[in-house]
Image (spheres, helix red, strand yellow):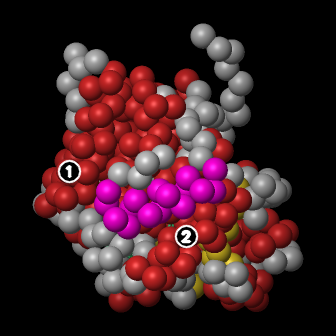
Amino acid sequence: MTTVNATIASSRLLLVGGGTVRQIAEVLGKFGLARPLVVSDPIMVSTGLIQRALEPLAEEGIAAKVFSDTVSDPTDTVIEAGVAIFRKEQYDCLIGFGGGSPIDTAKAMAILAAGGGKMRDYKAPIAADKGAVPVIAIPTTAGTGSECTRFTVITDTERDEKMLIHGLGALPLAAIVDYELTYTVPPRTTADTGVDSLTHALEAFVSRRANPFSDALALSAMALIGRHIRTAYAEPRNALAREGMMIGATQAGLAFSNSSVALVHGMSRPIGAHFHVPHGLSNAMLLPAITRYSVSGAEARYAEAARRVGFAAPGDADAVAAARLVTGLEALNKELAVPTPADYGIKEADWNGKMALMAEQALASGSPGNNPRVPDAAEIVALYREVWTGAPANV
Ligand SMILES: NC(=O)c1ccc[n+]([C@@H]2O[C@H](COP(=O)([O-])OP(=O)(O)OC[C@H]3O[C@@H](n4cnc5c(N)ncnc54)[C@H](O)[C@@H]3O)[C@@H](O)[C@H]2O)c1
Ligand SMILES: [Fe+2]
């Protein structure tokens, strides 16, 4: 048993349960906040989902303004535009309402509004710890876990790079985790965001920075997601499945925020930046191949993950269970109709042409260094190639 050395951080308040979004004014009141700018996206506005947050605020006399220009995979230019709006009036907090993109936008706006400068100034390995504007996060996907992580991922538009920004400044003050907000998530996004959560839990668990706190959350999250992901995908209005996925996603967020992500996320961000593949989908494309590559670095942990997710039986030996994790993830991708990069419409020459740059960007993010087996640039290129061909690489 090694000595534990961990720094654990979480938001001040986490409200969890169906219908909890109705308590939003109460949550603001607890912190003496009364002038929120709501950060969301055009779909939340056009579908009316945003009213679930605005109506209970209005009932308490809070007429919140909405900044709904956020984009999927938020960019530095959108953050700067949001901060300009935030500075125009005397807002005292930000409410991030939506999937990971609006929540990440709100968190990045909070850091930039408080600290000034350019988004790039806060890129990892710099720690964006200093006092940010208070953020209340309300996720509508299950999900990125962004509502309770100390990370925000922002695209540098000049460099086509998804920058990882981390620090206590990115941790929301409070989060409201209400699974009833996820009933309208379409099946493709349910699958992609669900695999993102599963990847968070798995990577937190096998990370070199895993600790007893992140382990407990990661194991619980893997069991919940393993049990509910297929039902949530097939039956969007299944309350039990939606609730299980939402709790699993938040637990997975807390797990990786207090451990780390690893090689899958390191390699996934460049795919998102260069080819505009949704975050969870690029994770899903990578997950079986990267797991196959990584198993030898932490076989017992991968085996335990396989048992928790339900791919292996409790009595399976580690080698058997770990192998079942890889085949289980491949089968899950099929069930969730995860496309290959080619099916997604990416051209092979473009993919090959970007592999060296993507490998460099993956390594620069620091995430691969937390993987149980740490690759060099050439191995990462071989793994990108494997993800294209589908044939196991000789690495
Ligand atoms: N900060 C972190 O810790 C962290 C972790 C993982 C991912 N991320 C980031 O999060 C972003 C992805 O977030 P996401 O996967 O939640 O996707 P998203 O926020 O981009 O949303 C995907 C789509 O689903 C729609 N949508 C969201 N909720 C809906 C609902 N309830 N009903 C109908 N439609 C709905 C959105 O409008 C959008 O069109 C990426 O930028 C990724 O890098 C951040
Ligand atoms: Fe993620």
Horizontal side of 257 relative to 165 (left or right) equals left
Decide if ligand 1 comes within 8 Å of the CB at mark 2: no
Residue at disc 1, secondary structure: helix
Residue at disc 2, secondary structure: helix
Residue 79 placement (x, y as % from top left): 67, 80
Give the magenta part as a residue range: 376-391
Residue 316 appears in the rendering: yes
**Between 95 and 345, the one nearer to me in the picture:** 345
Q: Please, what is the three-letter code of the amino acid marked with disc 1?
A: Ala
Decide if ligand 2 comes within 8 Å of the CB at mark 1: no
Could you tell which of marks 1 and 2 lies nearer the N-terminus?
1
- Give the numbered dot on residue 331: 1
According to the image, label 2 marks what residue? 355
Q: Please, what is the three-letter code of the amino acid marked with disc 2?
A: Met
Q: Residue at x 43, y 35 (%)?
A: 295
Give the class, few, some or many, for how many residues have Cα within 10 Å of label 1's Cα (few <14, many ≥20).
some
Horizontal side of 295 relative to 124 (left or right) equals left
Horizontal side of 82 relative to 118 (left or right) equals left
Q: Is residue 52 within the magenta segment?
A: no
Horizontal side of 204 relative to 387 (left or right) equals right
Residue 21: which quarter of the image?
bottom left
Q: Nearer the viewer, mark 1 or mark 2?
A: 2
Q: Is residue 384 within the magenta segment?
A: yes
Residue 50: which quarter of the image?
bottom left
**Between 37 and 234, the one nearer to me in the picture:** 234
